[in-house]
Amino acid sequence: MNPTYIARSTAVAARRLGDEMVVMSAVDSTLFTLSDVAAVLWQAADGRTPLDQIVRERVCPAYSVDAETALRDAEDFVRALAERGILLVASQPIASPAASQGGAAAASAAGEPR
Amino acid sequence: MSLMGELIQKAIALGVPLTAHVDLTYRCNERCEHCYLDHDDKGEMSFEEISGVLAQLADAGVLFLILSGGEPMLRRDFFDIVARARALLFNVKVKTNAVLVRTAEAQRLRALGVEQMQVSVYSHRPEIHDAVTKLPGSLRRTIEGIRALRAAGLKVAVANVMMRSNLADRQAVAAMARELGATYSADPTVTPMMDGDRSVLDLRIDGSELHNLFQDKDLVGDPEAFCAPPPPVGDDERNAAPCSAGHSSCYISPYGDVFPCVQFPLPSGNVRAQNFLDIWRHSPQLLEVRSIRTGDLPVCSSCAHLGTCTRCPGLAWTEGNMRGPSSADCEKSFYRTGVPSANMLARGLTSFPSGIAETGLAAFPPAGHRGIGLIQIAPLRQTAA
């Protein structure tokens, strides 16, 4: 099976608010709040790390869930966000627009530790 | 409660400034007759300073960023600032007159992921609009700018400040906005000049016109519901913050001054001298603003309109007391419902025959006669794009 790569769209606004990640699409102004697990996937969406590796290394240890179940859920989540245009999904690594735009500052704004 | 409402409540509970309004310049290519700004450049923040402020705002939790002025597009580094803001994942709205927007600028803004452009339009007639802006040809150029923005796929909100000179054109401006594919909001706010000059308030519309506005279903939805007598006030209303200013939102001037709101010019710190978060968390002025609950207001807490009034603490502050009434909003509440406010009653205006505008006006003379003179309505209705 081909690996899946995910990257944050540039057409979003995002900020951590307390224990939630808030994401807003600039395309249709839809507002989302992401759960903890979803926020982990969002933060890790660098376009370079395969989704199954993100799930294995970031989700499973933190949430005590088996890899198969977590990956299935993650794929559903990724598909839903891709349909909304706030995540980019590809079978090849993606030159992450978010990373190239803002570097460390953008990562921090999206809720990642610097 | 909507998701946005929940976010605002959460931001207030966490002490997070969810929204920041940053004026990039007070310079402008128009000279609108009602504008409260001094357009001379008194030492604007540089790109590096603004970049630093934006990073601090992002770290503080600001999600919604309003870039305005003056005319923000007069800055040579305007697009660099927008790009920086978008790289920091702000939701960016720009307030502009769109005079400088053409296809290339519109496409660039679209590519940067700007959420919305708010464009000021005063009339569908050049002789009226251009007389307000004092820039010949400005209506034509503004409309061309809006068309370019729409063609690029950007959302545009037409903002119509209503004054004596252009009030009659309101419905035509709304129709023009629809034709352009823009949303429309009307606002009769005219505020004193920053230097305290209140002569500009003569431009405001008469209070009697407020009643007519409140009967316009295009603005208020259901006039009967909108103008219904105020419901009883409960503990929730008494314990609520008067508005979001200083609670979940703030304003920063081109010179780095921090205020609770663009309409609440209470100096609370300067980002050239202090870290933004230090100002936000520890400024005595912001702490005082934040300490006030509606139930604490000496006059308004006894007012029948407490739960529904759009009282602006900034306008109250410009009248001398941030805990006092905002007389313009007293007028709005009265002309909306026919029920006198506690502020009016305290002034001895105790008798109001049945009916609203005409009879009420006789007992409650136009604002200027009382030396109050501020009429302010938040956009009565905004349609989601």
Image (tube, grey):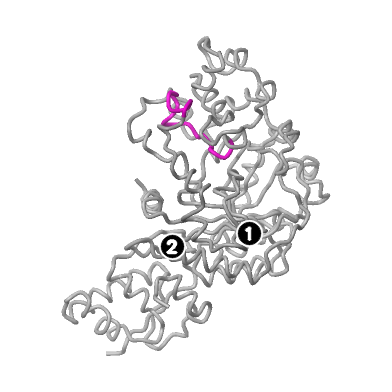
Q: Amino acid at mark 1?
A: Gly
The vertical placement of B146 against B307, above or below, is: below
Q: Nearer the viewer, residue B274 or B57?
A: B274
- Residue A45: x and y in percent read 38, 79
- The answer to whether residue B108 is seen in the rendering is no
Q: Which disc number belongs to residue B256?
A: 1
Q: Nearer the viewer, mark 1 or mark 2?
A: 1
- Residue B25: x and y in percent read 70, 58
Q: Dot 2 corresponds to which residue?
A: A24
- The answer to whether residue B56 is seen in the rendering is yes
Using the image, name the chain to which the residue with label 1 belongs. Answer: B
Give the magenta range: B298-315
- Looking at the rendered structure, the secondary structure element under dot 2 is strand
Q: Which disc number belongs to residue A53?
A: none
Query: Looking at the rendering, which quadrant does residue B236 occupy?
Result: top left
- Residue A62: x and y in percent read 22, 76
- Looking at the rendered structure, the secondary structure element under dot 1 is loop
Q: Nearer the viewer, residue B288 or B230?
A: B288
The vertical placement of B17 against B364, above or below, is: below
The vertical placement of B198 against B15, above or below, is: above
- Residue A34: x and y in percent read 33, 65
Name the quadrant of the N terminus of chain B. Answer: top left
The residue at the point 35 percent across, 61 percent down is A18
Q: Amino acid at mark 2?
A: Met
Magenta span: predominant SS is loop
